[in-house]
């Protein structure tokens, strides 16, 4: 662990906590870019009430919910009554599960989700994260800066390196598939004549 001079200033448990904190920061940088660096899929188990399916224990962010193999839209609390009486399945988060309406316990419910950031537990633990080579420099410099600060030593050079690594990651990670053009999705459908009528009132 970090040794500053002749004194082991950071106990092993605290050093592990600092690494986990910086790894979580890096993880959130990538997750917030809305790119699927860490996505998993999972099949949900029903709770038995005909409406709710249990989420995996490691869920952090949900990317999509599928009912009988088809992606479904969410509903709000204000839309619950309509969702319950509708013919098209819709979902909402409900505590530690997903509520799917209209209720039907025979449905197959699955999801694509981002799991929680991995954590080191013991000194021998390793982390395996799917990101570009060199991005772990942020964790290295960020942890080193925190250790310097704890030792009441100048951490400005290390912090500057961490900041540069962070800026590079944020800039590059925003579009993982560089061959895919950014698009605006038309969720309602577009009719030129309908659009003209709305604009000109005829």
Image: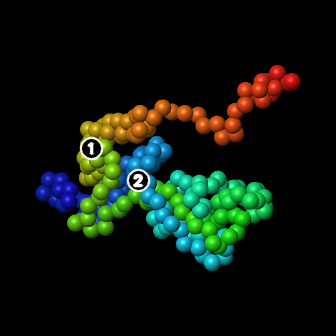
- Residue 116 visible: yes
Q: Residue tagged by mark 1? A: 133
Query: Which circle's residue, 2 or 1, is located before the other in the chain?
Result: 2
Give the camera-side residue of 143 and 154: 143
Residue with the mark numbered 2: 38
Mark 2 lies on a secondary structure that is loop
Residue sitting at 31 percent across and 67 percent down?
Answer: 121
Q: CA distance from mark 2 to mark 1?
A: 15 Å
Q: Secondary structure at mark 1?
A: loop
Q: Are marks 2 and 1 in contact (CB under 8 Å)?
A: no
Say few, some or many: other residues with alpha carbon within 10 Å of mark 1 (under 14 / 14 to 19 / 20 or more): few
> At which x and y percent is residue 124?
22, 66
Q: Which mark is residue 44?
A: none
Left or right: 98 as drawn, with respect to 167? right
Horizontal side, residue 32 vs residue 85: left or right: left
Residue beneath the point at 60% across and 75% down: 47
Number of callouts in the render?
2
The part of the image, by quadrant, that contains residue 84 is: bottom right
């Amino acid at each position: 662990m970090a040794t500053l001079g002749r004194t082991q200033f950071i106990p092993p448990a605290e050093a592990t906590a600092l690494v986990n904190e910086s790894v979580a920061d890096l993880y959130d940088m990538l997750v917030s870019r809305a790119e699927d660096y860490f996505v998993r899929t999972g099949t949900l188990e029903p709770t038995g009430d005909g409406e709710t399916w249990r989420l995996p224990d490691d869920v952090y962010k949900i990317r999509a919910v599928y009912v009988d193999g088809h992606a479904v839209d969410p509903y709000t609390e204000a839309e619950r009554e309509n969702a319950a009486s509708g013919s098209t399945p819709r979902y909402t988060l409900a505590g530690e599960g997903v509520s799917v309406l209209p209720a039907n316990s025979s449905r197959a419910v699955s999801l694509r989700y981002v799991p929680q950031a991995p954590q080191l537990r013991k000194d021998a633990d390793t982390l395996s994260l799917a990101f570009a080579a060199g991005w772990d420099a942020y964790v290295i410099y960020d942890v080193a800066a925190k250790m310097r600060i704890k030792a009441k030593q100048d951490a400005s050079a290390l912090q500057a390196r961490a900041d540069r690594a962070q800026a590079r990651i944020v800039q590059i990670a925003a579009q993982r598939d560089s061959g895919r053009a950014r698009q605006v999705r038309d969720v309602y459908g577009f009719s030129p004549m309908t659009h003209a009528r709305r604009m000109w009132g005829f």
